[in-house]
Image: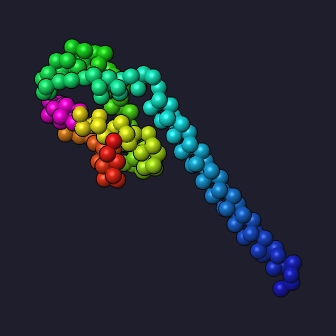
């Protein structure tokens, strides 16, 4: 076999190898770009004035004695504004918990966004969420948020 024959035999293999490496690098860069885009969307969501106002109201202004008192003060029938704020905040946490649970987002990204504010919020509202679960007959309600809380606690974040 001549040198030219050897070269013609291995050239396609080398070309395919280069193409595979190039494709792998492009996929990795695309994933990193998507992660960066997701991080910025989360950052914007968690820093929006509406979100921060709702979060601060929930943490520092909402007070209740028991589940019945909570629903009287902040339930959807009597106080649509408060109920909407609570749902808006909790749906964002729920989405973040779902992304984390399914492995679509790195824990460090989550911790950067929520480690300080989410644990105290969950602890304050846990009895309400348990009441919602019983009232609606849905034991999985707010389950992804609970997963988020459990992961933060498991990894040492106290809030």
Residue 70 percent location from the top left of the image: 18, 23
Residue at the outermost top position: 78
Indicate left or right for 47 with 140 as reference: right
Instruction: Examine the residues drawn in magenta and state their main secondary structure.
Output: helix
Specify whether residue 9 is in view. Answer: yes
Q: Name the image quarter holding the C terminus.
A: top left
Residue 6 in which image quadrant: bottom right
**Which residue is pictured at 33% across the width and 31% down the height?**
90
**Which residue is pictured at 42% across the width and 45% down the height?**
111
Q: What stretch is highlighted in magenta?
A: 125-137
Residue 74 percent location from the top left of the image: 23, 20
Residue at the outermost bottom position: 1
Residue 4 percent location from the top left of the image: 87, 78
Indicate left or right for 151 with 9 as reference: left
Q: In this view, does 2 lie above or below 60?
A: below
Does the segment drawn in magenta span residue 133? yes
Indicate left or right for 35 with 159 as reference: right
Frontmost residue, 66 versus 2: 66
Frontmost residue, 18 versus 124: 124
Q: Is residue 4 above or below residue 35?
A: below
Specify whether residue 138 is in view. Answer: no
């Amino acid at each position: 076999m001549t040198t030219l024959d050897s070269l013609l035999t291995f050239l396609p293999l080398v070309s395919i190898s280069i193409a595979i490496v190039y494709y792998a690098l492009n996929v990795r860069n695309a994933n990193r770009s998507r992660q960066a885009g997701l991080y910025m969307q989360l950052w914007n969501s968690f820093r929006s004035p509406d979100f921060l106002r709702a979060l601060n109201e929930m943490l520092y202004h909402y007070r209740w004695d028991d589940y019945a008192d909570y629903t009287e003060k902040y339930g959807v029938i009597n106080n649509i504004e408060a109920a909407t704020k609570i749902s808006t905040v909790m749906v964002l946490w729920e989405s973040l918990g779902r992304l984390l649970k399914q492995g679509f987002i790195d824990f460090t990204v989550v911790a950067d966004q929520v480690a300080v504010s989410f644990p105290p919020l969950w602890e304050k509202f846990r009895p309400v969420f348990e009441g919602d679960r019983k009232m609606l007959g849905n034991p999985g309600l707010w389950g992804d948020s609970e997963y988020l809380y459990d992961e933060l606690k498991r990894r040492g974040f106290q809030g």
